[in-house]
Amino acid sequence: MTQIKRVAVLTSGGDAPGMNAAIRAVVRKALQENLEVYGVLRGYEGLIKGDFIEMNSKSVANIIQTGGTILKTARSEVFKTEEGRKLSYKNLKKAEIDALVVIGGDGTLKGARALVDEYNFPVVGIPGTIDNDLFGTDMTIGYDTALNTVMTAVDKIRDTAMSHDRMFFVEVMGRDAGFIALRSCIAGGAEAALIPEVETDINALHEKLLGYMRQKKTSCIIIVAEGDDAGGAFKIKERLQEFGDDFDMKVTVLGHTQRGGSPTSYDRYLASRLGIAAIEALIDDQRSIMVGMINNEIVHVPFNKTIKHHRTIDQKMLEIINTLNT
Ligand code: F6P
């Protein structure tokens, strides 16, 4: 059993609301366990450069309510190379750091797995991404806040869509996954969601829109996942224009607004529980795992499992959207 005295924490990849709450929980739990804690700046870039700062209880005061990440983040290309990881390991050893907590999405966990596999260095991951695309946890940190951001935007768009009898295509993030699109479609009462997991049939979509018009529905909102195979909201609009109807169509791309803002109570709660669980796991000599939460219980998921298994969408969600739009 490795005796851990000093741990480090970093955030990597796209920032997600609630990452700060997770950092806070990691730091405070580590201090409670009499561990020394260091923050690594700018994700794996900070490991490569040896950019470490010592943290105490005060360093994480007043951050639970803030979006972004106080440790900053980056998508490191250098860490993807063996040389980058070698440098990182050297810097961790030099700073006498015994274990690492990484907060981020799929790419972050892949990086963590490489560090464990190549150097047997203990790493525990915390799922932090607005995309909710990680296998082994009901929700990832940031997803709930992003959903609320999209829902609020859709509510606002509906006011203007109704006033002008317009059709709106609202493009949401999610990379190659449709989780944000599906949930926000239901919560925002939108008429349809186009997602990467289901091939978009432009003729069927056109028929659906004509159907709405026949029902004297003069406005509607379609949520388009950025990774949809049709090529995004502008492309969908273009292809629908080719049918020559007189639909008044507008596109809104929500973009990075979905990544910011104060985390919801759920994201703060989830982040706090996962932060504590990560330190507990390290003390328990765990390495190469992600902590997740399923049915309100903490689970440990091996990196291999969460990285290999592609999280699938729940078909029920599509049925719900259909039911609510008949
Ligand atoms: O993974 C989070 C995410 O916001 C995705 O939804 C999106 O595709 C991507 O990051 C955008 O990344 P960047 O901010 O680096 O352009």
Image (spheres, grey):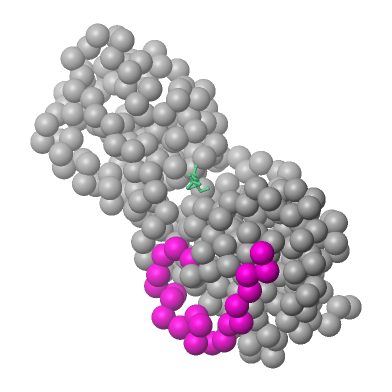
323 with respect to 267 (left or right): left
Inspect the magenta stretch and tell me whether residue 217 lies in it. no
Inspect the magenta stretch and tell me whether residue 50 lies in it. yes
Residue 126 place in picture, x, y as percent? 62, 63
At 50% from the left and 25% from the top, the residue drawn is 229
Q: From the image, which quarter does the C terminus lie in?
A: top left
Residue 298 place in picture, x, y as percent? 65, 68
292 with respect to 263 (left or right): right
Residue 95 place in picture, x, y as percent? 74, 77
At 63% from the left and 87% from the top, the residue drawn is 31
Q: From the image, which quarter does the N terminus lie in?
A: bottom right
Q: Which residues are magenta?
A: 49-69
Instruction: Name the residue nearer the viewer: 95 or 159.
Output: 95
Furthest-left residue in this view: 163
In which quarter of the view is residue 120 placed?
A: bottom right
Instruction: Name the residue nearer the viewer: 7 or 149.
Output: 7
**Residue 186 visible in rendering:** no
